[in-house]
């Protein structure tokens, strides 16, 4: 036997499961109503509410960055979970709207929160980004690669909006949501069902550094209202949770009509369905954790009950998983 054949690589000891111990959220102070937008482009309140369900959205200040919002949401999640920054050894920031790609947001966010020398990286799966990041963190905890992780979805979509383009300026907004993931004796984050439809990647694009976000709204709407619900159902099946057992359904807040269509097909009759888009707009990777954080804060959903998270968006990427509400 050669030396190359005589050794076995040692792997870290993991945990039986991973769970979310707390959420946190942050929204900028500036509120932009549909009437405000009607003074900029050819639209009105009824037209916007009828098509996407939005009444108002939050827009960051010019000097407010993706990192600023991520720090606010991440700090709130740490405080809510009673977790010290010293205990976090992995930080993931899901975003597709950072001001500059180098250096990454995660390392800077960790430093500002007092988290010392964690693994830190950004993840871009657009509006599905939080679900992708959550699964990545949960897998790291289960395999022993990390003990405690901070997962943040943060977006400043207003950086990439053409305010003269009615098809996008009425939809997108800014904000951040975060979750703290830690080891558990029983699973609190269920199996992910994820995938992509790269043949439709050109339906939502930023063409180059000088361009704004553009989307083919009708094509995306048709895809989301037909392709996403089966993914959500598959996530329930893999987790061993029937749709009628769900206490909460938290789809990406893309469009209220899409949210309603997914809810109808799932027949999650006992679930509170997130509708944060009405007052927050579409905040991409921030929308799911921000919506659920606010639902928990209001007391809309019970601790310990199952919630289904469903992300979908540019790429086209999608992901769904059942979690236990902290």
Image: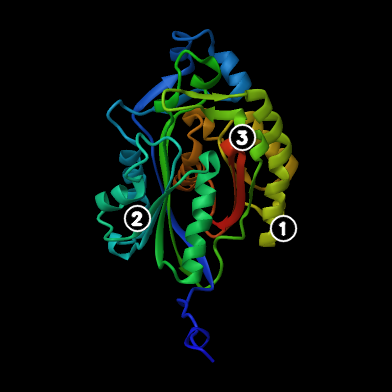
Residue 301 in the image: x percent, y percent? 54, 49
Residue 14 in the image: x percent, y percent? 48, 74
Q: Does 107 sit left or right of 255 as displayed?
A: left
Of residues 104 and 30, the one nearer the viewer is 104
- State the SS at label 2: helix
Real-space Cα separation, disc 2 to disc 1, in angstroms: 31 Å
Which disc, if any, is residue 255? none
Q: Mark 1 touching mark 3, by CB under 8 A?
A: no
Tell me if residue 325 can be seen: no
- State the SS at label 1: helix
Real-space Cα separation, disc 1 to disc 3, in angstroms: 28 Å
Q: Nearer the viewer, mark 3 or mark 2?
A: 3
**With respect to residue 162, does 12 lie above or below?**
below
Residue 70 in the image: x percent, y percent? 36, 43
In the displayed orientation, state which residue is furthest to the bottom: 1
Of residues 149 and 207, the one nearer the viewer is 207
Which disc, if any, is residue 78? 2
- State the SS at label 3: helix
Residue linked to disc 1? 237
Residue 7 in the image: x percent, y percent? 48, 86
Q: How is the image coloured?
A: rainbow
Q: Nearer the viewer, mark 1 or mark 3?
A: 3
């Amino acid at each position: 036997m050669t030396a190359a054949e005589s050794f076995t690589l040692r792997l870290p000891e993991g945990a039986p499961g991973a769970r979310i111990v707390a959420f946190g959220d942050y929204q900028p102070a500036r509120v932009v109503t549909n009437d405000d937008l009607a003074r900029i482009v050819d639209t009105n309140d009824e037209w916007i509410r009828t098509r996407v369900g939005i009444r108002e959205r939050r827009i960051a200040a010019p000097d407010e960055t993706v990192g600023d919002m991520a720090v606010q949401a991440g700090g709130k999640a740490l405080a809510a979970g009673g977790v010290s920054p010293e205990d976090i050894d992995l930080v993931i920031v899901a975003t597709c709207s950072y001001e500059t790609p180098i250096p990454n947001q995660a390392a800077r966010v960790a430093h500002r929160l007092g988290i010392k020398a964690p693994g830190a990286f950004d993840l871009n799966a657009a509006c599905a980004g939080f679900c992708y990041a959550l699964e990545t963190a949960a897998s790291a905890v289960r395999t022993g690669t990390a003990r405690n992780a901070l997962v943040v979805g943060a977006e400043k979509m207003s950086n990439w909006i053409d305010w003269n383009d009615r098809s996008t300026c009425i939809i997108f907004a800014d904000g951040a949501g975060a979750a703290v993931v830690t080891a558990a004796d029983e699973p609190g984050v269920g199996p992910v069902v994820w995938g992509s439809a790269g043949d439709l990647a050109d339906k939502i694009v930023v063409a180059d550094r000088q361009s704004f976000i553009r989307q083919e709204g009708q094509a995306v709407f048709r895809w989301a209202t037909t392709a996403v619900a089966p993914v959500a159902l598959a996530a329930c099946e893999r987790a061993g949770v029937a749709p009628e057992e769900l206490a909460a359904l938290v789809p990406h807040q893309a469009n209220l009509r899409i949210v309603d269509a997914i809810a109808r097909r799932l027949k999650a009759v006992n679930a509170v369905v997130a509708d944060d888009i009405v007052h927050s707009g579409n905040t991409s990777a921030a929308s799911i954790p921000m919506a659920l954080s606010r639902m928990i804060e209001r007391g809309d959903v019970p601790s310990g009950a199952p919630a289904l998270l469903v992300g979908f968006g540019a790429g086209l990427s999608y992901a769904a998983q059942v979690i236990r509400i902290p």
